[in-house]
Image (spheres, grey):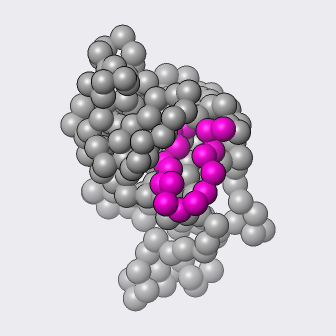
Amino acid sequence: MIIPQYPNVKILGFAGFSGSGKTTLLSRVMPILNKHGLRLAIIKHSHHDFEIDQPGKDSYRLHHAGSRQTLLISPYRCALIKENVLPEEPGLEQALQELDGSQLDLVLVEGFRQVAELDRIEIHRPELGKPLLCEDQPKIIAVATNQPIEVGIPVLDLNQPAIIAEFILQWVNPSNLNYDPESGS
């Protein structure tokens, strides 16, 4: 999967059942990827309504006064809040169009399990009693887990974010790294 106008930007998904630790893993892996010079974006899928601004702040008040699109701009960051006219979920393709790919090397996607063409790392905790997604989803390229399992793809230690980051770096640019998934180095 690519962003059409930015074909060199890689997109990698993270899939797992609720409570498996997707967000925790991403928050531990992203700083390592940043240290290696990757320019990252994250798209996190949510089934819930959410607010990114704080009640009582001017931007919150103005947005809730009736704006369909609110753009917050400062010297440090900008954020666009858009209301969906109808309560429908935008697809991953639409979400990718919102990004400025000229500033990116890698987009990490949490969720969007229904997108068949997205390469993913599965986060699996056997103690949750949920099935492995990789058994039914061929685009899963590795499983990050906290217990040994036998599958036909690389198995990464969920508690070793540096090893997972190295796997991702190898996936992003296989010619620059020497990651051996069998040895974890």
Image quadrant in which the C terminus is located: top left
Q: Is residue 17 left or right of residue 26?
A: right
Residue 105 in the image, given as x and y percentages of width and height? 41, 30
Q: Is residue 131 left or right of residue 159?
A: right
Please tell me whether residue 12 is drawn above or below residue 177 in the rendered image. Answer: below
Image quadrant in which the N terminus is located: top right
Q: How many numbered discs, if any?
A: 0
Q: Nearer the viewer, residue 141 or 57?
A: 141
Query: Does the magenta run of residues contain 41?
Result: no
Query: Does the magenta run of residues contain 122?
Result: yes
Image-quadrant location for residue 183: top left
Q: Is residue 111 visible?
A: yes
Residue 145 in the image, given as x and y percentages of width and height? 43, 46
Residue furthest to the top: 175
Q: Is residue 102 visible?
A: no
Q: Is residue 165 left or right of residue 9?
A: left
Q: Residue at x 58, y 84 (%)?
A: 65
Residue 110 in the image, given as x and y percentages of width and height? 52, 51
Please tell me whether residue 128 is drawn above or below residue 93 in the rendered image. Answer: below
Please tell me whether residue 28 is drawn above or below residue 86 in the rendered image. Answer: above
Q: Residue at x 39, y 37 (%)?
A: 156
Q: Residue at x 35, y 37 (%)?
A: 164
Q: Tell me the magenta residue range.
A: 120-135
Please tell me whether residue 52 is drawn above or below residue 10 in the rendered image. Answer: below
